[in-house]
Amino acid sequence: MSVASPFADVEIPASSVFDALFAEIDEQDLDRTALIDSANSAQTSYRELRVRVIAMAGALALRGVGPGSVVGLLAPNSSQFAIAFHGILRAGATATTVNALFTADDIAKQLIDAKASLLITATALLPHALEAAATAGIAREDVILLDGGPRIATGHPSLADILARTVHAPQAVFDPAIHPAALPYSSGTTGNPKGVILTHRNLVANMAQIRPLLDIKRDDRIIAVLPFFHIYGMTVLLNAALQARATLVVMPRFDLTEFLDTIERHRITYGFIAPPVAVTLAKHTLVDQYDLSSLNTILSGAAPLDSELGAAVEERLKVRMIHGYGMSELSPVSHLMPADRGLRLFGELAPLSSCGWPVPNTINRIVDPATGNDILPPTEGLSKPGELLVSGPNVMLGYLGNPQATAETIDADGFLHTGDLARIDSMGRVFIVDRLKELIKYKGYQVPPAELEALLLTHPAIGDAAVIGVPDNDGEEIPMAYIVRRGDAPLSADDVMAFIAARVAPHKKIRRVAFIDAIPKSPSGKILRKDLRTAA
């Protein structure tokens, strides 16, 4: 049985992302502030933003970048990131956003797989960017700095150089329904990272789907600390806030003191966070030293939110907490609470342990993983758990160059199999309870166990290895390695963690180690992770 969204369908414009955001800005909105960089309080109006995005698109077109081109974007949050991202899309090219914490090897793998011809980065990341670009076959002159000065000083073209030239941006012609706009990388439901093809229609649709639920207003000031390179920050923060003509106060990274100071100084009204930040807001003594009374709403996403934790944040900050769910393959939001937690429509507040309801224009199924049969919503209480399936205009086009993985994830009826176990209650609220897939989700980032296991097995003192996710003291899922020593070779837990830390991005680090005699496996050689979870 299919479960439709309780919210009315919304109109989805058949337009590009640029046109959805900038084509019809009211004259009264053009001089409103779109972006404020928290580090230096530099402001960018909507008028300036649109002009710079078009100039960026024109400069890229001069370099031969257009439909069919892929441009890598490796940078922390800034107003320049927004200009570059939307300039790439306006040029008709595809932006593959890269995690700013990646190692040079990680960056190179993504650039090569995406077939990127250009890399836009920031000065602080330039050493890794140059190493990765060289590996990927991208010339030094095709590495552009967002924050650099004149080319003569850095040896690289900069955003300032580009914007200083007045270049006409040709109108790129493409079909928004099938033309790739963004190519973030996700491990999906299995295996190593894969390029998620998100079309202009996918991104425009998700903006339209979440707009009536988020209820962002023109006068809202939104703190943008979640990274724009992550699909959560890209759609829910950057695009949704700009479409609402609100003001984004942009932070390049999370620092608690700066975060609290920014909220107080800029009178932030709306916050978007992940659960680890909620833990800090609920518990840290520093919070009491700042005036956070301007905040009225905080949305938590990217990982499950404990209901007690959400209630603690609500009580301490006197705000309304809401919760949502999604994944890169869903552009990303598939489930969300309205800003009033469903009070007006349903007469009661949705429990924070749920992720709310399916967003407009989507249909859900919850199926028994063993039989494939639909699990029906109950008349009261919660249903038994089943795999959550989602259909709608926000479902990705597919995985780049991987038709098999695409077919395994999107079925013949157009339902995307999330790999997550969910339950539904009598009011249609969805509760994510566990994951069928083997991925570890650490602070909103996906960590593939197979990738870490492969690295561990390159260590000469490791005979066999398995990695699972286990909760730490705060309930955050962390990667834990089970290690079988090779012979009598000396090897400590610290040795194992240091070995991995030197080879992966910070969120992929092994954070707990146990030594065992043998890794439990099935007759076919598959690791029995459920046995390890029981032992943990």
Image: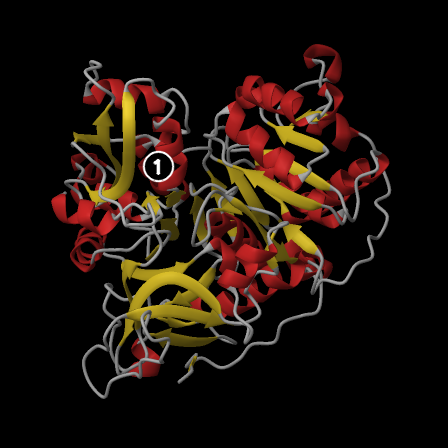
Taking the spot 22% from the left edge, 29% from the top edge, the residue there is 484
- When asked about the image quadrant of residue 472, the answer is top left
Name the one closer to the observer, 40 or 121: 121
318 vs 80: above or below = below
Instruction: Please indicate, yes or no, whether residue 179 appears anywhere in the rendered image.
Output: yes
280 vs 395: above or below = above
Position of residue 389 measured from the top left corner of the image (x, y, whole percent):
42, 70
- When asked about the image quadrant of residue 493, the answer is top left
Is the residue marked by circle 1 packed among few (<14), some (14-19), or many (20+) residues within 10 Å? Answer: some
470 vs 360: above or below = above
Residue at the extreme front:
523
The secondary structure type at the circle numbered 1 is helix
Taking the spot 73% from the left edge, 26% from the top edge, the residue there is 142
Name the one closer to the observer, 69 or 146: 69
Position of residue 210 measured from the top left corner of the image (x, y, whole percent):
48, 66
Residue at the extreme top:
153
Q: Which residue is mark 1?
A: 259
* Amino acid at circle 1: Phe
- When asked about the image quadrant of residue 125, the answer is top right
Name the one closer to the observer, 416 or 354: 416
Q: Is residue 308 left or right of residue 301?
A: left
Q: Quadrant of the N terminus?
A: bottom left
Position of residue 43 measured from the top left corner of the image (x, y, whole percent):
57, 38
Q: Is residue 293 left or right of residue 148?
A: left
Q: Quadrant of the C terminus?
A: top left
Count how many numbered circles sit on residues in the image.
Answer: 1
Name the one closer to the observer, 380 or 213: 380
Instruction: Please indicate, yes or no, whether residue 218 appears anywhere in the rendered image.
Output: no
Position of residue 44 measured from the top left corner of the image (x, y, whole percent):
61, 41
Residue at the extreme bottom:
379
Taking the spot 31% from the left edge, 38% from the top edge, the residue there is 260
Q: Is residue 439 left or right of residue 172?
A: left
